[in-house]
Image: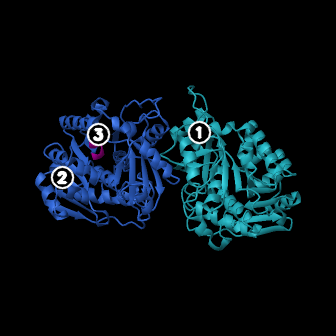
Chain colours: A cyan, B blue
Amino acid sequence: MDDLQPAADVGTLDVVAVGSALVDVLTHSSARDIERLGLVKGTMTLVDLPRAAAVYRAMGPGIEVSGGSAANTAAGVAALGGRVGYIGKVAADELGEVFIHDISAAGVVVARTEPVAPSDDPDDDRATGRCLVFVTEDGERTMATHLGVASTLVPEDLDEEFIARAQVVYLEGYLWDLGPAKAALRRAIEVAHASDAIVALTLSDPFCVERHQREFLELLNGEVDLLFANEDEVTLLFGSNGFDAALEAVQETGVLAALTRGPDGSVVVGASGPVAVPAAPVAQVVDTTGAGDLYAAGFLYGLTHGQDPAECARLGGLCAAEVISHLGARPQADLRALAGGAGPPP
Amino acid sequence: MDDLQPAADVGTLDVVAVGSALVDVLTHSSARDIERLGLVKGTMTLVDLPRAAAVYRAMGPGIEVSGGSAANTAAGVAALGGRVGYIGKVAADELGEVFIHDISAAGVVVARTEPVAPSDDPDDDRATGRCLVFVTEDGERTMATHLGVASTLVPEDLDEEFIARAQVVYLEGYLWDLGPAKAALRRAIEVAHASDAIVALTLSDPFCVERHQREFLELLNGEVDLLFANEDEVTLLFGSNGFDAALEAVQETGVLAALTRGPDGSVVVGASGPVAVPAAPVAQVVDTTGAGDLYAAGFLYGLTHGQDPAECARLGGLCAAEVISHLGARPQADLRALAGGAGPPP
């Protein structure tokens, strides 16, 4: 596993994250309401603009919080004191302004990207992406995502010099759903490899894995060095008969994998086999939105600060525990203080 | 005090609230940061667009929640099961859409008002109003408000038939800062009196009282029937030497007054003298934003459902306790369940 330790000071950023820039609209909801809206509890559904408008109309009062999976991870790395950059597309509208304000205020360096100008056509999707999030009493989240301009990421949008400054380039699996964005991710991988950066991929969602199983498996053959997934996602990816079989399958790929299991903690799989790390205690689970994103943040911070994979997983668990103890997918507590003795000071 | 009991079924709405339609942008902050921004802790400062932009740039990551004092009160009345309407102006922009969605989804009937179209001039204030809220560790909130189109309320914007349907017309003192809006409030009072509705006024803010002391006092002479204020505001209003002197002064006006004292509960002053009502217990004060607004909601719901003033004050205290136990100024818990035995079912 140690061959994945990045050399110190390779670049001026610990992590560059590439993802869908979204503003989350959160509401409390019942399982029945979610069913009535035609959504599948616990998963993310991509919706077009008319469907997003219809779901929003049927939704209770909400709160708006900047989100987007990789952006949440970037905010988490920054909260831990890491140097982190972000690439994602917003529109020149109010939610785009909110997104850029929040991620910048969190201490994340945003790559040069021109906000996309609004359109006069009301059917045009050139708005900042939003994710309608229904939080049920069990703390689980169900999402209807309208990607808006986040879906228009193309290779030309990438600031390659910015990517080349990173020790780890972290890619959001969700973007694989989009043809042009997929090309952008492939280009980001090339740039990362050219500068000897670690390429990390998160599988994002079980449905996302079902849609792209073959391509994700191919990526593990030399393109991706570090895989983030939860139990369901990794089991689906390898078509395994249970989690233990998936652990064997992922070990055969030679890729370092950080696999989350909710309250059962996580398992890190490297060359020397799986290592289980228990979850950090949580007094009350309020909203699981961002659990995986913040786990990745802790893991990546640890990895870029000389910690071994089990320590990285422990720090990931601490960050995940913080984010699920309140509403919203970005950290509220002082993660540096929370991490405490988990690693060397930033 | 009983002469303020509204006749049953006078109109089809229990309450119509008139106020500034704002979206709150909340962030956690330190007292030092607030001072550095030139704001006064615990108060509201009106800021123009450039100042609002500068404060926002210096602000940490935020969450956006629909707000506006009278709108919060309206949402609270609806959460209790009351029939409530709202009048306030938003722009045809994303935050305006958020505001209208949230207040409608809360069960409030919004008066017909055309959202104000955006301007091509970047210096133009025709955006939905926003309130930048800094919440300190003591739970206190400090606000920088940019009213945007909320400041352009004019008498012509009032749907007078809508106002005439109310048992209580509830007016936000903040609007008194604006010439045209002041005329709109005066017109709303005329319409309310013509339909035998109760006119309620909240003083909103100590600075607001300092600016309009003489006019507010004049309003108590036949224009306003029910006054909401906190301890500081009512003491400033009458230029009294302490709260007890203010109680005597308010009793002389003959106006029913509901006066809040934070953790010390509230005092209702009517013809038969002051009645103190203790505060409802709160496990942890997270954010006092909306405490006065939700107190008014409980009080108005009680008043329009046959409760005596002390019961109204108790229900107000319950609603205030709920809203200060979480971030944001709109109720999250089921206020009807919370109110429980506090009054007859809606």
Q: Chain of mark 1?
A: A
- Label 2, label 1: how many angstroms apart (C-alpha)? 48 Å
The C terminus of chain A is located in which quarter? bottom right
Residues behind callouts 2 and 3 on a single chain: yes
Q: Chain of mark 3?
A: B
- Label 3, label 1: how many angstroms apart (C-alpha)? 34 Å
Give me the residue at 69% from left, 66% from top. A264
Of badges 3 and 1, nearer the viewer stands: 3
Q: Secondary structure at mark 3?
A: loop
Is B211 in the magenta?
no
Q: Secondary structure at mark 1?
A: loop
Q: Which residue is mark 3?
A: B178
Q: Counting residues from the N terminus, which is met first, the one under dot 2 or under dot 3?
A: 3
Q: Secondary structure at mark 2?
A: strand
Which stretch did the figure color magenta? B173-177
Q: Which residue is mark 1?
A: A128
Measuring from the top left, give residue A82's x and y in whole percent: 66, 60
| Majority secondary structure of magenta residues | helix
| Mark 3 nearby-residue class (10 Å; few <14, some 14–19, many ≥20) | some
Measuring from the top left, give residue B306's x and y in whole percent: 24, 51
Q: Which residue is mark 2?
A: B256
Give me the residue at 63% from left, 69% from top. A339
Give the residue type at disc 1: Thr
Give the residue type at disc 3: Leu
Measuring from the top left, give residue B263's x and y in whole percent: 32, 66
